[in-house]
Amino acid sequence: MKASVPWLLGVCLLGSAAEAGKPRKPNAREQAEVKQALSGTGEPVSKKTFQVGLKGAGSLLFVPVLDFTVQPPLRLHLVQDGKILHTLSPSAADKAWPILQFEDVSFKDVNGDGFEDILTLARYMPGVGPKAGKPFRQAAVYLSRGGKSFEPVSKDVSDALNQSPPSKLAEVLKRLKKISKARLNLPKTAPPAPTQVSASPSP
């Protein structure tokens, strides 16, 4: 029986590694962890709250929060051990247009550095201008800096991904494959704050 313990441990470790980057719904304990971390600062989008293992960061909870009493309303938290480990920067779309719905998230290594990056998709609707009242989707991509922080891709990459509004994240992944890895590498120092977008994308 003792001899079988190392083998079973190895199987468990392999199983855990295989699940890296694959989100699942949080269990009751993890839901309580989310509640503790938010401490009444907003309600999570429960259908899009996930537990996920990310290289360099470990096991954490991805928690999107929509709070229309603040601007921008969408906040994307990474929660670990009952505390907010990191909050992703608002995207240019978050700053430019009213959000209707947070729709999707994916955890994929898009630049080949071995660390899972974070891709998100949300739906917006301008209140003024020629596109007023016409909803559209925009994606955001956050590159992992060794799993310790996540930073948005450059403005030119974001514009290339969103000029024609994507309908789903699978479409965003296809577009990312056409972008050189050099353009998807993070600079050695933190990038400047993203420029606010003021015009609606092409339909």
Image: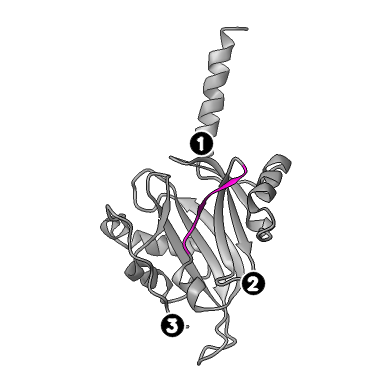
Spatial CA span between label 3 and label 2: 20 Å
User: How far across and down, in percent of the image, does residue 157 sit?
Assistant: 35, 67
Q: Residue at position x 58%, y 11% from top?
A: 4
For badge 2, the amino acid type reads Phe
Closer to the observer: label 3 or label 2?
A: 2
Q: Give the extent of the magenta segment.
A: 82-89
Mark 1, other Cα within 10 Å: few <14 / some 14–19 / many ≥20: few
Residue 162 shown in magenta: no
**Nearer the N terminus, badge 3 or badge 2?**
2
Closer to the observer: label 1 or label 3?
A: 3
Q: Residue furthest bottom?
A: 130
Q: Residue at position x 52%, y 78% from top?
A: 97
Q: Is residue 113 left or right of residue 55?
A: left
Q: Secondary structure at mark 1?
A: helix
Closer to the observer: label 1 or label 2?
A: 2
Placement of 72 over or under 13, stated as above or below? below
The residue to which callout 2 is attached is 68
Q: Secondary structure at mark 2?
A: loop
* Position of the N terminus by quadrant: top right
Q: Residue at position x 60%, y 66% from top?
A: 102
Placement of 143 over or under 128, stated as above or below? above
The residue to which callout 1 is attached is 18
**Nearer the N terminus, badge 1 or badge 3?**
1
Spatial CA span between label 1 and label 3: 42 Å
The residue to which callout 3 is attached is 198
For badge 1, the amino acid type reads Ala
For badge 3, the amino acid type reads Ser
Image quarter for residue 196? bottom left
The dot on residue 97 is none
Image quarter for residue 45? bottom right
